[in-house]
Image: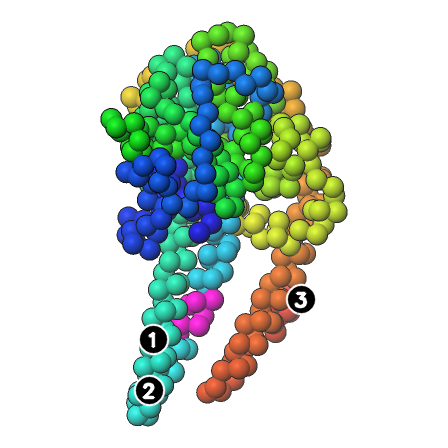
Amino acid sequence: MDSHLIDMNGRLGFTKRFPYIYRGYWHIGSKIDDLKGIEHIVPLRKSRRYDVPLHPQQTVVQFNSTYLETIGRNDRRRGDAVVVSGALAGLGIYMLIPFMSFALEDLLNGDYFSSLFLVIVSLTVGIVTFLMLFAVSTEVLTSRHYPVRFNRKTRKVYVRQYNKKVEVFNWSDIHFYIFYMKEDADIRGVKFASDGETIEAMFALPFHIKGDEEELIMHFEFFTSYMSKNEKQFLQAKNAVRYVYPIHKYRETPIQSLERIKLEFHFDHMNMEYPKETVMPKYIFAIFSPMIAIRYVGRLISMLTCYRHRFPEAIEAECKIDPNDPYDLNKYLPEGNLEQNNKLFWKTVINLIMFLCALILLLFVGAFLIDMMGAARPHGDYPSLVDKLWYMVSLGWLP
């Protein structure tokens, strides 16, 4: 199961309704050494200096002397469920209606075996379609981001989980581990029950990568340096930040959406705060432009339909920022921040045109495949989606 649907408790959005299907990801209440779906874990120590560079990896939403707020673990994949699960749900609905009509027709004609078979197929397609629609609901009409907020003064961590619950951790109670899974690895903050082994609560740091322990340690060191009571370490964390992502205040712009999608095409074993050094060769973008276009559409839909997250008033009261704080990076933007780079506009326009062309091509491929399935069905002819799509794209509908 792809981890992009796993919430920071290690539970899927489906789990409360379908606990037996996704039982392997029910980590809360499990022993730390007996987690299903985890290949192995590596403990990290908050008190240890790992003597590595600090890598925020473009995950910072707010930075000041009071608290550090980051995006959630799955921000880089935001919108994927909208397009993938949405497309599968649309295909399921497209198939479901004729299957049900064929089943009814066979029943009326006395072909009970064929009717039963089509009913079973319809139920299967219906269940899969429902699950896909539920997956879409995890990225639409929900929070624009799932913040993890580290408060230096109260020594608390506030986490907005994917189940919409806000959990509060004491920094001293959190044990950190690198969790290695089949698809990638991340860093989890774990709170144990009194026995010291059973997981009582859990959240993830925002950056994840496939199999690079050193890079994860660099990311971990950024947070421990920020939370350190040593002023020098705090300043090192502050100086490591070159980008802030103000999703807490403003809806993500189309330019920002594209830049966030492109983070997947950086060498994430390097410091992505310096994108000119970490970006992959341009031909990589050309090769993957159809996929980028699809993901971009999904992210736009997700961001346009989601709302701004707000912590409860009691938490905000604990997180008041000094209006004269010289280290408020949302007020004093660090060098290199996206909002200061006006040259991105025309580059983004060109990319959008390229992605739009790639998306239209993919729509034609999808329409052709659906027409092929329609042609294989019995009981008559069906309208061609390719012809309808060409009618729209060629502007044949204009007077």
- Is the magenta region chiefly helix, strand or loop? helix
**Comparing labels 3 and 1, the label whose residue is closer to the camera:** 1
Q: Residue beneath label 1, please? A: 120
What residue is shown at x 41% (from left), y 77% (from top)?
98
Q: Alpha-carbon distance for marks 3 and 1?
A: 41 Å
The answer to whether 72 is drawn above or below residue 84 in the figure is above
Percent x, y of residue 205 = 46, 31
- Left or right of 353 in this view: 43: left
Q: In 3D space, how far apart are the residues under numbered discs 3 and 2 (Cα atoms)?
A: 45 Å
Residue at position x 46%, y 45% in the image = 3
| Disc 2 and disc 1 in contact, CB within 8 angstroms | no
* Residue 397 image position (x, y, % from top left): 61, 68
Residue at figure coordinates x 58%, y 53% from the top left? 294
Hey, which quadrant is residue 261 in on the image? Answer: top right
Q: Is residue 187 magenta?
A: no
Q: Nearer the viewer, residue 42 or 273?
A: 42
What residue do we see at 29% from left, 54% from top?
A: 20
Q: Which mark is residue 113?
A: 2
User: Helix, strand, or loop for circle 1?
Assistant: helix
Q: Residue furthest left?
A: 194
Query: What is the distance, in whole Å, between disc 2 and disc 1 at their CAs?
Result: 11 Å
* Callout 3 amino acid: Ser
- Which mark, by number, is residue 394? 3
Is residue 336 rendered to the left or right of residue 166?
right
Query: Within the magenta stretch, is there residue 94?
Result: yes
Q: Quadrant of residue 212?
A: top right
The boundaries of the magenta stretch are 91-97
Q: Which structural element holds mark 2?
A: helix
Left or right for 396, reference 162: right
Quick one: 83 or 33, which is closer to the camera?
A: 33
